[in-house]
Structure formats: C-alpha cells, structure tokens
Image (cartoon, rainbow, N blue to C red):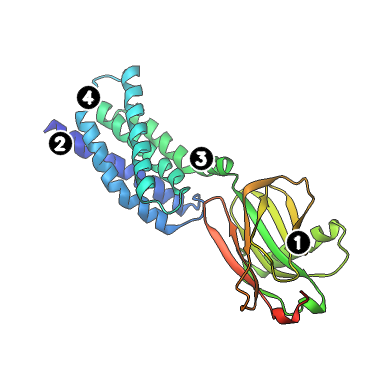
C-alpha cells in the first residue's frame, strides 16, 4: 500500500508541476514562438513521464530525515529522468529540435519535485524549494533560451529602387509581425534612413517588411532588382544592422565586417516559367521559418 501511495503521489506531483510550468509559461507569453501545439504536446507526454516518475518513486527508499546525501540523490534522479525522457521524445517524436529546450524546462523541475516529495514528504522546506524551482523554470527559461540560441527581434526588409524597371515588383507578405500601422511606418522610415546612411542616395521602395523573435534588435535589409540566379543563404545580423545588395553575380554585404549568426535568410530561384523573382524563408531561433516570395513581370525587367 505504501508503494502504491508513493507511486500515485509522485505521478500526481510530476504531472501537476510539468503542466503548471507549461501552462504558466505559455499564458504569460514566455515561450519562444508561442506555439499552442507545443503546449498540447508537452501536457500529453507528461502523462507517461508521470508514470515513469511514479515507478521511480516507488522503488526509491523513503527518508525519515532530510539528509544532504539523500537530497542530492533525489535531485540527481529527477534530473536524469527529465533529461532521459526529453531525449527519448526528441529522438523519435519532436518535429523541431529547439522544442527539447522547453521540454527540459518542464520535465527536469517536475522530475526533481516528484522525487523530493516521494523521498521526504510534504515538508515545508521541500514545498518551498519546489515553488522556487517552478518560478525559476517559468521566468528564467526565456532569457536562458535567448542567450543560448542568440534569439533576437529580427526585422527583415526587402526593398527595391524606385525606378521604372522595378515598378511592378511586389512581395508577399507585405508586412508581418507588427500590431499597428504606426509601427509599420516607423520601421519603414528606419529602413530608408539606414540605407541612406550607407551612402545610397537613390529612392527606395519597401516590398516586404517582417518582424519576429524576441530579445535584442537586429535589422537585415535586402536590396533586390531582378530575378535571382542561384540559391543563397544571407547570414542574419547578430544584434546589428546589415544590408545585402543584389549584384549581377553575387550579394554584396554592407558593412562587410558586421557580425552575423549561423542561421540566415534563405533565398532561392523560382522556376523559369513563373513570374516570381525569388522565394525566401527567414528562420528564427525557435526553429520556425517565415516564407514569402517576390513577384513581378520578369519579361519586362532587364536581364
């Protein structure tokens, strides 16, 4: 009967803590990407994880006093189980690898909490420690994730010179990631100001303006004129501003020394029969991509 009681208590604590952290983090907007499918995913898989915690608690000897060595063992077992379950689910089920980071923030605290309650019961010090652990998991996951993955608020602008040869160019999406028209206009003004600051005196028109991610601000300006000739990945700036200018045989980077990240803006050429000039995907730290295209009557453009 004692084994069954410890099994049920550990399973209930593990599931409750995991679900609480997931629901609170999602509701407060502290999860990168704010994907509701991830919330359902974690809550669903917290059920078999809770069963695993219950089994581990049932075979773990109960401690009558809180000893330092016993406390460390309970924390170690809960941590190992959280990592092991995350690895297993990541290995066979996760569609986006960065989801594993968020799963760890739920399952490691829940594993530790379940093992502590199973070993020492509902002592005030244990309950207090679990509460602190939950708060840390809720509020510290995002800044740790941002630092670890170089997450940032990235604005990407595709622009083109305001001239006759580019008059029929357009892009989809035109805007994304902004709340008000005032925000869009402010971002467009900043783009034009930055491009002029690099010595470009001609007039430009913004085809597409998108913003995604959280953290420090970064701006990438891509100047397009004609159909792209080959696929390319333009590295994302690291908390700074970069301009990529389309040339006949390459993309010119300005300033050339600006720091960049490994992920970037993918641009690839469309089929020759299409009116598109290019397709693009902008990747962010949570592993999601925003896709779009630049269109125009290619036959009217200089080759």
Percent across and percent down for residue 104 are 41, 41
Which percent across, then down, holds residue 73? 32, 23
Who comes first in sequence, dot 3 or dot 1? 3
Locate residue 176, reporting x and y percent.
61, 66
Nearest to N terminus: mark 2 or mark 4? 2
- Mark 1 surroundings within 10 Å by alpha-carbon count, few (fewer than 14), some (14 through 19), many (20 or more): few
Query: Reading the chain from its start, which is encountered first: label 3 or label 2?
Result: 2
Q: CA distance from mark 2 to mark 1?
A: 71 Å
**Are there few (<14), some (14-19), or many (20+) residues within 10 Å of tag 2?**
few
Give the CA separation, mark 3 to mark 2.
35 Å
Mark identifier at residue 140: 3
Of discs 2 and 1, which sits in the foreground? 1
Q: Which residue matches tag 4?
A: 62
Q: CA distance from mark 2 to mark 4?
A: 13 Å
With respect to residue 68, does 111 lie above or below?
below
Which residue is at 71% across, 76% downward?
Answer: 169
Tag on residue 4? 2
Dot in front, 3 or 1:
1
Q: Nearer the viewer, residue 142 or 168?
A: 168
- Judged by depth in the image, the label closer to the viewer, 4 or 1, is 1
Alpha carbons under labels 4 and 3: distance apart: 31 Å
Q: Does the CB distance between marks 4 and 3 fall below 8 Å?
A: no
> Is residue 262 shown above or below 220?
above
Q: Indicate whether 217 appears above or below 81.
A: below
Q: Quadrant of residue 82?
A: top left
- What whole-number distance in Å separates the C-alpha atoms at marks 3 and 1? 46 Å
Mark 3: few/some/many CA within 10 Å (<14, 14-19, 20+): few
Is label 2 in contact with label 1 (beta carbons under 8 Å)?
Answer: no
């Amino acid at each position: 009967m004692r084994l069954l009681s410890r099994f049920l208590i550990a399973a209930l604590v593990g599931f409750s803590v995991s679900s609480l952290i997931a629901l609170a983090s999602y509701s407060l907007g502290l999860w990168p990407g704010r994907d509701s499918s991830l919330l359902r995913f974690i809550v669903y898989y917290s059920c078999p994880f809770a069963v695993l915690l219950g089994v581990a608690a049932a075979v773990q000897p109960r401690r009558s006093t809180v000893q330092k060595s016993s406390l460390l063992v309970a924390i170690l077992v809960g941590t190992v189980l959280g990592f092991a379950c995350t690895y297993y689910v990541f290995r066979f089920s996760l569609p986006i690898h960065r989801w594993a980071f968020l799963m760890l923030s739920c399952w490691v605290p829940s594993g530790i909490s379940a093992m502590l309650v199973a070993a020492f019961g509902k002592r005030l010090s244990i309950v207090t420690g679990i509460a602190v652990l939950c708060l840390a998991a809720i509020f510290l996951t995002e800044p740790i994730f941002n630092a670890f993955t170089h997450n940032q608020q990235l604005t990407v602008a595709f622009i083109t010179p305001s001239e006759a040869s580019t008059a029929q160019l357009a892009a989809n999406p035109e805007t994304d990631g902004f709340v008000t028209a005032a925000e869009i206009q402010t971002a467009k003004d900043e783009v034009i100001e930055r491009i002029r600051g690099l010595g470009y005196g001609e007039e430009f028109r913004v085809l597409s303006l998108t913003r995604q991610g959280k953290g420090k601000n970064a701006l990438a300006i891509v100047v397009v004129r004609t159909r792209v000739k080959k696929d390319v990945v333009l590295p994302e700036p690291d908390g700074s501003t970069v301009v990529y200018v389309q040339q006949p045989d390459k993309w010119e980077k300005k300033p050339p020394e600006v720091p960049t990240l490994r992920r970037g803006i993918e641009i690839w050429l469309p089929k020759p029969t299409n009116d598109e000039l290019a397709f693009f995907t902008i990747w962010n730290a949570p592993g999601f991509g925003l896709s779009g295209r630049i269109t125009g009557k290619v036959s009217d453009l200089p080759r």
